[in-house]
């Protein structure tokens, strides 16, 4: 597996993938919709997977002495790595924006624990749709990306709307009110757990599909 | 060494139909057929890149489905030219590739890179199509493989390079424990080095024999155009114009009256061409 991950980084990754996490620095802009910055992680994932397809990555990998399930595992781990990098930079920038620079955000949810919980949940939803569709279609990015992005965008709109317009939810999940820190941390934990489950789940579903695909 | 039985793959517009053949140790098998006949699909199915709907593939006495990883360690596989990762340097490509093979031999790889005049510091896109084929061959030859499955390994190469590569194939099988299965359109290559010929047409194996056995089992008859009907029913394929005809028929289908015609021993190319003509004649 380590060999395959090294291959992903050395051969399959587009060099610009290392730049994309820094787009989470958009969280440093005052009164900016925070959902935008981290979403670039998914664009990075798409560009990267598309770049791999264009470079006939699968044609190379399929001839190697490795089981098909490992191809899936390496791709999903490399995809999750891109997402986590994006979130990690987002967390740092969110903390700086909220506690050093600007405080509360007037546009959308603040960069608090609940926000990052929702980011993990959104990415989890994306993963569970994108990866099985991508591998089921023989590593084709187009349709897989469209379906997964629409679902992700719908999730972001719904969560931002609920947090923004339902007063009780707004009070609990937006801002930095110490009374609700437990709720926000709970959202974060649920997000992380479901994100991890989405990585594992999408691996198992994808393997089942990919084993039957003719490349 | 390689045993393929009833390999079947059905696509909406194409069917690989019960392909069966065996390749013993120490031999070279040439795989011929027109474009779209099913050569690449067969080779990919053997390698489990295409998932067959039915059939079995046994390599080194092991089932490919259950022992794929283990078996692939000992297969030198080439699917045409190396067209992946065009921006990557060859040295980096080789560095990553070698990590997957337990028996990778740096010296062998260096030997072939030198022989093929490949500069490792170049990027893959800087290589010509022929050089990309050579790079793939260098990789296939550098990890102590026992079976070589090569799709169009001589395509895009100049005659000198082709001859060089055919010599390498002959050297490979000379110790008797390695085999080569390669597809090609260049039938003269097969006439130089192949022991067996596998001929596929529209997904169906139409000939599987030793090279000499195959060439002996067909004959070309030539005669005047007015006599063409005498052989038309037995002909696999026929060419005719206003003055004369030529037809490929099976040796076993010859009759006494055919003594009146001129007969020729066909080449592999003739056999392919006349089989292709069969559809036109239909």
Image: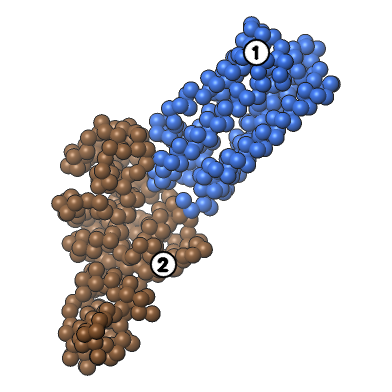
Chain colours: A blue, B brown
Name the one closer to the observer, A189 or A100: A100
Residue with the most extreme left position: B160
Q: Residues within 10 Å of mark 1 (few under 14, many from 20)?
A: some
Q: Quadrant of the C terminus of chain B?
A: bottom left
User: What residue did someone put label 1 on?
Assistant: A30
Residue beneath disc 2: B203
Task: Please state which of residues A146 and B83 is positioned toward the viewer in this rendering.
Answer: A146
Observer-side mark, 2 or 1, equals 1
Mark 1 — on which chain does it sit?
A
Where does residue B83 sit, x and y in percent of width and height?
35, 44
Label 1: which secondary element: loop
Instruction: Work out whether disc 2 and disc 1 sit on a shared chain.
Output: no
Residue in the image at 40% along x and 55% along y: B44
Q: 10 Å neighbourhood of mark 2: few (<14), some, or many (≥20)? A: many
| Mark-to-mark CA distance, 2 and 1 | 64 Å
Is the residue B73 above or below the residue A161 in the image?
below
């Amino acid at each position: 597996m380590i060999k395959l991950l090294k291959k992903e980084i050395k051969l399959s990754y587009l060099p610009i993938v290392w730049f994309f996490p820094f787009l989470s620095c958009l969280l440093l802009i005052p009164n900016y919709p925070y959902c935008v910055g981290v979403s670039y992680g998914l664009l990075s994932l798409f560009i990267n997977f598309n770049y791999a397809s264009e470079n006939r990555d699968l044609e190379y990998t399929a001839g190697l002495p490795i089981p098909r399930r490992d191809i899936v595992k390496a791709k999903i781990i490399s995809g999750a790595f891109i997402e986590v990098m994006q979130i990690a930079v987002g967390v740092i920038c969110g903390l700086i924006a909220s506690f050093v620079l600007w405080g509360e955000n007037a546009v959308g949810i603040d960069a608090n624990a609940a926000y990052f919980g929702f980011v993990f949940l959104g990415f989890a939803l994306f993963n569970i749709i994108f990866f099985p569709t991508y591998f089921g279609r023989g590593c084709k990015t187009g349709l897989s990306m469209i379906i997964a992005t629409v679902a992700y965008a719908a999730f972001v709109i719904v969560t931002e709307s609920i947090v923004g317009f339902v007063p009780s939810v707004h009070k609990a999940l937006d801002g930095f009110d110490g009374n609700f820190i437990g709720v926000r941390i709970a959202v974060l934990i649920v997000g992380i757990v479901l994100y991890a489950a989405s990585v594992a789940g999408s691996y198992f579903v994808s393997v089942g599909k990919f084993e039957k695909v003719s490349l | 060494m390689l045993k393929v039985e009833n390999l079947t793959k059905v696509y909406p517009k194409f069917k690989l139909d019960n392909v069966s053949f065996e390749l013993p140790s120490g031999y070279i098998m040439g795989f011929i057929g027109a474009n779209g006949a099913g050569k690449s699909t067969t080779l990919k199915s053997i390698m489990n890149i295409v998932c067959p709907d039915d059939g079995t593939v046994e390599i080194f006495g092991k089932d490919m489905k259950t022992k794929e990883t283990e078996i692939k360690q000992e297969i030198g596989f080439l699917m045409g030219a190396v067209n992946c990762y065009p921006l990557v340097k060859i040295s980096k490509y080789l560095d990553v590739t070698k990590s997957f093979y337990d028996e990778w031999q740096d010296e062998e790889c260096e030997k072939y890179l030198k022989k093929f005049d490949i500069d490792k510091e170049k990027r893959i896109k800087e290589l010509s199509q022929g050089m990309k084929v050579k790079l793939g061959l260098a990789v296939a030859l550098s990890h102590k493989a026992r079976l070589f499955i090569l799709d169009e390994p001589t395509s895009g190469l100049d005659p000198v390079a082709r001859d060089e590569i055919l010599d390498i194939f002959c050297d490979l099988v000379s110790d008797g424990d390695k085999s080569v299965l390669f597809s090609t359109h260049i039938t003269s290559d097969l006439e130089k080095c192949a022991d067996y010929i596998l001929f596929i047409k529209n997904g169906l194996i139409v000939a599987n024999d030793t090279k000499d056995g195959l060439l002996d089992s067909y004959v070309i008859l030539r005669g005047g155009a007015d006599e063409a009907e005498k052989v038309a029913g037995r002909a696999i394929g026929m060419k005719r114009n206003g003055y004369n005809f030529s037809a490929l028929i099976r040796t076993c289908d010859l009759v006494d009256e055919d003594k009146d015609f001129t007969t020729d021993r066909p080449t592999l190319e003739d056999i392919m061409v006349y089989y292709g003509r069969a559809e036109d004649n239909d």
